[in-house]
Image (cartoon, helix red, strand yellow):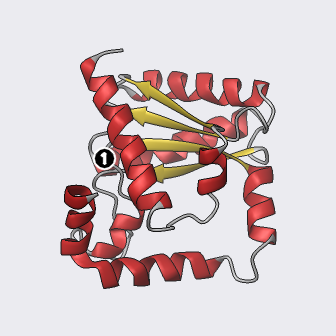
Amino acid sequence: MTDTATHALAATREWLERAVIGLNLCPFARAPYQRDQVHFAVSDADTDETIAEALLAEIRQLEALSEAQRETTLLILTRGLADFDDFNDFLALADGLLETLALDGTFQIASFHPDYRFADSAPDAIDNYTNRAPFPVLHILRESSVGEAVDAMQDPDAIYRANIERLRQLGHDGWDRLWRDG
């Protein structure tokens, strides 16, 4: 593994542990992570074509394994899609790949990026940090896991609202301290 790949993997694990699980941004992340059912794949692909190939390979690997073996995969991109607009555009290609494979009801792709921003928010709004990761990440989720998690909640949209509120209370200083003080 290259130094870049090693750094990307360590930074993404730290983000998952401190932000996603630590701040409870995703209440469904802790259990599969603790059960070692989260796979981290690092790719230096840097074109839409090579990123799609890496994504396809990870989808096929996830498809070949049972949920008990691997529940989810995070594809971490060290060179590709560094520009958020390019990343956002690629998501349509990723969704199209699932449709072409007839897997759009089996898997879904969540997106995380260092410059993530919601459509109606300022680039520096703390709300965006709910989806900010140290590297571009394509998170391949099993629809069955998502469905079970959503079915277990009375109001799934409450997660999003709670995350925004949590980050607004934390603020930029609190977010920065999360990485310094850990």
Above or below, 115 against 12 in this view is below
Viewer-nearest residue: 60 or 70: 70
- Residue 18 appears in the rendering: yes
Query: Residue 118's quadrant in the figure?
Result: bottom left
Which residue: 34% across, 68% down? Answer: 128
Residue 61 percent coordinates (x, y): 68, 24
Query: Residue 102's quadrant in the figure?
Result: top right
Residue 46 percent coordinates (x, y): 34, 25
Which residue: 62% across, 41% down? Answer: 96
Query: Residue 28's quadrant in the figure?
Result: bottom right
Locate residue 151 relative to residue 37 in the image: left or right. right
Most extreme residue toward the top is 1
Q: Residues within 10 Å of mark 1 (few under 14, many from 20)?
A: some
Residue 74 percent coordinates (x, y): 52, 39
Above or below, 21 against 109 in this view is below
Locate residue 67 relative to residue 165 in the image: left or right. right
| Residue indicated by mark 1 | 134
Which residue: 50% across, 59% down? Answer: 21
Most extreme residue toward the front is 181
Residue 37 percent coordinates (x, y): 66, 38
Question: In terms of secondary structure, where does tag 1 sit?
Answer: loop
- Residue 79 appears in the rendering: no
Q: Check the picture and name the quadrant holding the C terminus.
A: bottom left
Above or below, 179 against 98 in this view is below
Viewer-nearest residue: 15 or 94: 15
Above or below, 83 against 101 in this view is below
Viewer-nearest residue: 86 or 155: 155
Locate residue 113 relative to residue 179 in the image: left or right. right
- Amino acid type, residue under disc 1 in the picture: Pro
Q: Check the picture and name the quadrant holding the N terminus.
A: top left
